[in-house]
Amino acid sequence: MDPLYDYKAPKKATNLSLNSDLLKKSKALNINLSATLEQALQEKLAQTKSQQWASENKNAIKAYNDFVEEHGCFGDEYRTF
């Protein structure tokens, strides 16, 4: 499986526009804005890529679910739970 992004890529300065009160309160609590944004973007990227994969593979997922519905899952007869 491919990584979400290049974790070793160099940092790049970026200008952002933020709600001024949100920024003020975050700074007052010593919240690391760069680290927080990176974490939020990583989570959003993972969520978006997951949704994209599910969308691209919805036909295969449906076909598999239909097959299991009709024929059961491999090894069902050996399941003890």
Image (cartoon, rainbow, N blue to C red):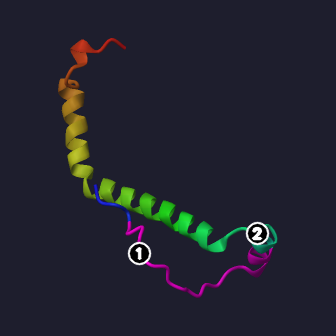
Mark 1 or 2 closer to N-term? 1
Disc on res. 27: none
Is residue 49 shown in magenta?
no
Query: Which quadrant holds residue 19?
Result: bottom right
Query: Which quadrant holds residue 48?
Result: bottom left
Q: CA distance from mark 1 to mark 2?
A: 25 Å
x 38%, y 57%: residue? 51
Q: Identify residue type, mark 1.
A: Ala
Determine the main secondary structure of the stretch shown in magenta.
Answer: loop
Q: Position of residue 21 (x, y in %)?
A: 79, 77
Q: Identify residue type, mark 2.
A: Asn
Q: Report the label total.
A: 2
Q: Name the residue that disc number 2 marks.
A: 30
x 65%, y 73%: residue? 33
Is residue 18 shown in magenta?
yes
Question: Is 38 positioned to the left or the right of 5 in the image?
Answer: right
Seen from the viewer's position, the closer of residues 52 and 2 is 2
Q: Quadrant of the N terminus?
A: bottom left
Q: Secondary structure at mark 2?
A: loop
Question: Is 29 positioned to the left or the right of 32 in the image?
Answer: right
Q: Name the residue that disc number 1 marks.
A: 9
Q: Position of residue 45 (x, y in %)?
A: 44, 64
The residues colored magenta run 5-24
Q: Position of residue 23 (x, y in %)?
A: 74, 76
Local crowd size for mark 1, using a 10 Å CA cut-off: few (<14), some (14–19), many (≥20): few
Q: Secondary structure at mark 1?
A: loop
**Relative to residue 74, is residue 54 depicted above or below?**
below
